[in-house]
Amino acid sequence: MLASVLVVLAVLTVRSRFDDPDLWWHLKTGEIIWMTHAIPLADLFSYTSNHQALIPQEWLAQVAIYGACKWGGLSGLMLWLCLFTGALLVAGYGLCSLYSGNAKVAFVGAMAIWFFATIGFAIRPQMIAYLLLIAELVLIRLGRTRNPRWFFWLPILFAVWINCHGSFILGIALAGVFLFTSLFSFQMGSLVSQRWDPRCRGMFMLAMILSVAALFLNPVGIKQILYPFDTMLNMHILLGNVEEWAPLQLSDARGVGLLVVLLCCFLLVVVRRTELFWDELLLLALGTWLAASHLRMLAVFGILAAPVLSRQLSTSWDGYKAEEDRIWPNAAFIGLSMLVALLAFPSRQNLEKQVEDQSPVKAVEFIKANHLSGPMLNDYSFGGYLIWAAPEYPVMMDGRTDVYEWSGFLGEFGNWAMLQSDPNALLQKYRINFCLLARQSPMARVLPLLHEWKIVYSDNNSVILMRTAPGSRAEE
């Protein structure tokens, strides 16, 4: 019954989150793989990347996203998002129940996962990665407490994970934490470490060796395995300027929530004399560091912290007996929940309106109707939609910031967009003929002041400017 509540919460949370700017290039890549039965290994969409080599680290997730679109259009994509969001919350609830042994207390943990994971709910491969992270923790817990054979599902999990998202490296790191702490047995006050049974530890070690080997089941081998390290060590512009990679502000609601969860975990140790296991302490520390460093990692913190909090609260519902639950009232509530989720699912018209509100739908129609000729300069946030809706117009920039940092263009574009360089320099270098900009962007106000440019189209979220000076490409 509580799981059905989480499904309703999932639908209500994401029903208005359809149009993520990165959705569209994921969708287009998935379509190319679906239609050609080949995985692109070089950029096909931009004229500024010079066919930069790619690491196809999300290709399997992209195919899944396109499959949902091919099956049901925009409604299929929204169903994909609802299903993965619901699966994430229900799986998190199952993980917390497994840790705490109390199905009602586990709901608190599931709500903690929901609160922090809302930072990343979108039709993007990261949704699959969150679910795989929970699955890894479930398998490790089952292997430790029930049967070590559960560990041998991990290589299959990692073979899927590396082809869906670069966060597989976090899964390997978490397994390393468990393996390290399995070697020690001690008690320092309320901090406890329990050495694993040698047979159990040996089977886990073997499963992890197989898991590392499974990482090589990808299109480009070692390059795909090293991709996360390249991101962390070399992509300074991406990490320093993209909002989702920004550090957490503790004044933010989720920053306050992180502090509250940590405070509860440690207060429960002091006040209620609950134990805190060493592996839990290390996972809390890792999750806190990741979330404090990058906003997008708040979801990871929630997934790592929720089972710890649930286990510590497990005795808060002392009289609960599952066998005394009343089946028919629960069944009726589950049916009502499913009805609410169905009624809350957005209509196709609602989804189209969401896309139109966030993407340059009308502007693209204008470009096609008037046969504007390129090269085109487009706003960063519009690049993904252009890749999907107007593939005949190569983009200058889109959300694949790793591609543009590798090619050297990301810094150049960033300086131009933030008015830190001569506006004409980039336009002349690439012989830009028209610009499609977000209405609120600084350049949308600057370019009309330059005598070579005039606004030819404008709506609530986008502006198109064309070059009009004598001798320009528009008049050639």
Image (spheres, grey):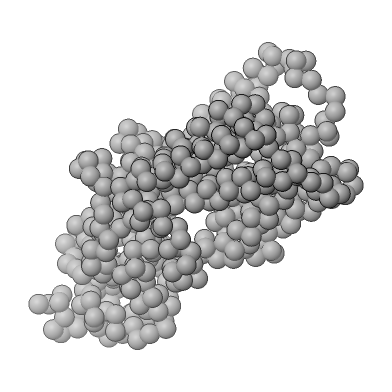
Residue displayed at 59% across by 29% down = 148
Query: Could you say where residue 2 lies in the image, as x and y percent from the top left?
Result: 67, 28
Q: Image quadrant for the C terminus?
A: bottom left
Q: Where is residue 447 in the image (x, y as percent from the top left)?
A: 34, 79
Observer able to see residue 93: no
In the image shown, does 279 or 100 lie closer to the viewer?
A: 279
Visible in this render: residue 418? yes
Residue at image position (26%, 47%) is 39
Numbered-mark total: 0
Q: Is residue 158 left or right of residue 386?
A: right
Question: Which residue is farthest front?
Answer: 198
Residue 55 picture quarter: bottom left
Residue depicted at x 38% and y 60%: 399
Q: Quick one: 373 or 160, which is closer to the camera?
A: 160
Q: Name the residue at the top extreme.
A: 328
Apparent side of residue 271 relative to residue 7 in the rendered image (left or right): right
8 to 409, vertically: above or below: above
Q: Quadrant of residue 6?
A: top right
Residue 56 in picture, x, y percent from top left = 33, 52
Q: Looking at this view, is 259 or 101 the one in front?
A: 101
Horizontal relation, residue 266 to residue 403: left or right: right
